Every structure is written in structure tokens, then in C-alpha cells.
Image: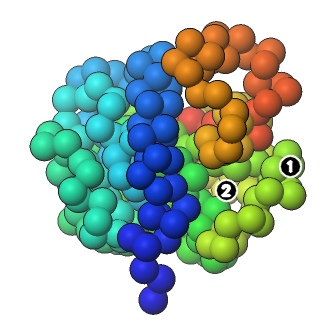
Amino acid sequence: MVDLSQLYDFRFGQTGLAKRRAVWRVLCQDYFAKLVPANATVLDLACGYGEFINQIPAARKYAVDLNPDAARHLDADVTFTQTSALDLSALPQGEIDVVFASNFLEHFEDKKSLDRLFAEVRKVLKPGGQFIVVGPNIQYAYREYWDFYDHYLPLSHLSLSEGLLLAGFVPERVIDRFLPYTMQGRTPTWDILIKLYLRVPLAWRFMGKQFLVVARKPG
């Protein structure tokens, strides 16, 4: 059994966590808040240490993760459930407006498991609800993709869109190059640089190695 707390500490550390929180604060304020209505009910799959869910404006917030250590990093307004994303039965069914997943789908061992995830997401989403997915695009990150021991399933923006379509979702926004592959390393992550990057999509064509896919549950 993988010790997720130990793995996350090794991968990100406290310095890395502070950096990620700062980056996600800007991402939420300047980009994702435009996709997520302020009165929405939001679920963060594999929430990690709450970098997204703590900072996205929303009326009700839910988060799930297998790592029990995640709970102590979440704000008081986030309802946390320690569970696999393949079993969302403890969450409100058909009441979620937005389900969000970042750098998560590549950890599934096969597409059969991914199909199970899509089915669980459909159950919790309201008709018309959104599934927002960010992740490394194997088309552009085919070298560094395998630097993480728990990366199994290579996905592109195209293969993910097809999988979502087959699962009954309607892909509405498909961006093949969105964010850079990682926040680790020496690349500056000052607020002003991130804000500028988000406002200049041309820069995404050179630096982006992660896709953004927004799909909707029909209804």
C-alpha cells in the first residue's frame, strides 16, 4: 500500500506546497473563477492539500482524497471525505454543479478504471453540470511524464475527450496546451508572471504541456 502522505512530502515538501498554493491562488482568481459560478457546489477529486478547493469561490465545497493527511490542510468550509474517487456514494448524488480534477487521471492503471470514474462523476453531477479536467498531455510531455512513479495512464486532450464522449459527457472546451507541465524547479512563479501568462494564450503554445478539458453532463 502506497503511503500517500510520505509520497506527497517527498514530491512537494513544505516549500513546494507554499509555492503551489501561491500559484493556485492566482489560477483560481484569474481563470477558474470564470468557469465556476460563485453560487456553485463544487467537488474536488483527489484534492491533495487543497490548493484548488480552498481558493475557488463557491457556495458549497466538497473534497475527496485517499490520503487522510489531506483533511488537515483544508479550510473549514470544505467538507472532506476520505475515499477513492471510484466510490462517490458518500457525496450528494445529482447535486454537484462542478467536479474538478487536476493531475489525477494519469494515476489510473487502465481505461476501464477511468470509465468507472466517469460513471461516478455523472452520478454526483446535476444535469448540465461541468466536469473540469487539467492534466499532462502525453503529446507534449512524453519525456517528463514518466518521471513520476505513480503515472500509469498516458492521455492526450483528444483521447480524454473521446473517453468523456463515450461516457455520456459533451466536451465543450478542449485546450491541448494550457499550463506548463510542473511548478517545480527554478522557473519563477511570481503572481504578475502567472497573470500575464493567463492573459496571453500565445504563450501557452510554447510553454503549455497540460490540457484543459471542460465537459458537461447533458440536461
The residue positioned 78% from the left and 19% from the top of the image is 203
Is 31 placed left or right of 58 in the picture? right
Question: Which residue in the structure is indicated by mark 2?
Answer: 163
Determine if residue 122 is in view: no
Helix, strand or loop at label 1? It is: loop
* Quarter of the rendering occupied by the C terminus: top left
Q: How many marks?
A: 2
In the depicted structure, whether residue 26 falls above or below residue 42: above
Is disc 1 in contact with disc 2, using a CB cutoff of under 8 Å?
no
Is 150 placed left or right of 28 in the picture? right
Which amino acid is tagged 2?
Gly
Would you call the spot at circle 2 few (<14 residues within 10 Å), some (14-19), or many (20 or more)?
A: some
Quadrant in which residue 134 is drawn: top right
- Rounded to the nearest angstrom, the CA distance separating label 1 from label 2 is 16 Å
Q: Nearer the viewer, residue 78 or 133?
A: 78
Determine if residue 51 is in view: yes
The residue positioned 41% from the left and 19% from the top of the image is 29
- Pick whichever of labels 1 and 2 is earlier in the sequence: 1
Q: Position of residue 73 (x, y in %)?
A: 26, 51
Question: Which residue in the structure is indicated by mark 1?
Answer: 139
Q: Position of residue 21 (x, y in %)?
A: 42, 37
Would you call the spot at circle 1 few (<14 residues within 10 Å), some (14-19), or many (20 or more)?
A: some
Which amino acid is tagged 1?
Gln
In the depicted structure, whether residue 192 falls above or below residue 15: above
- On residue 97, which mark appears? none
The residue positioned 86% from the left and 58% from the top of the image is 143
Is 114 placed left or right of 187 in the picture? left
In the depicted structure, whether residue 110 falls above or below residue 130: below
Q: Position of residue 79 (x, y in %)?
A: 18, 51
* Quarter of the rendering occupied by the N terminus: bottom left
Furthest-left residue in this view: 76
The residue positioned 42% from the left and 80% from the top of the image is 3
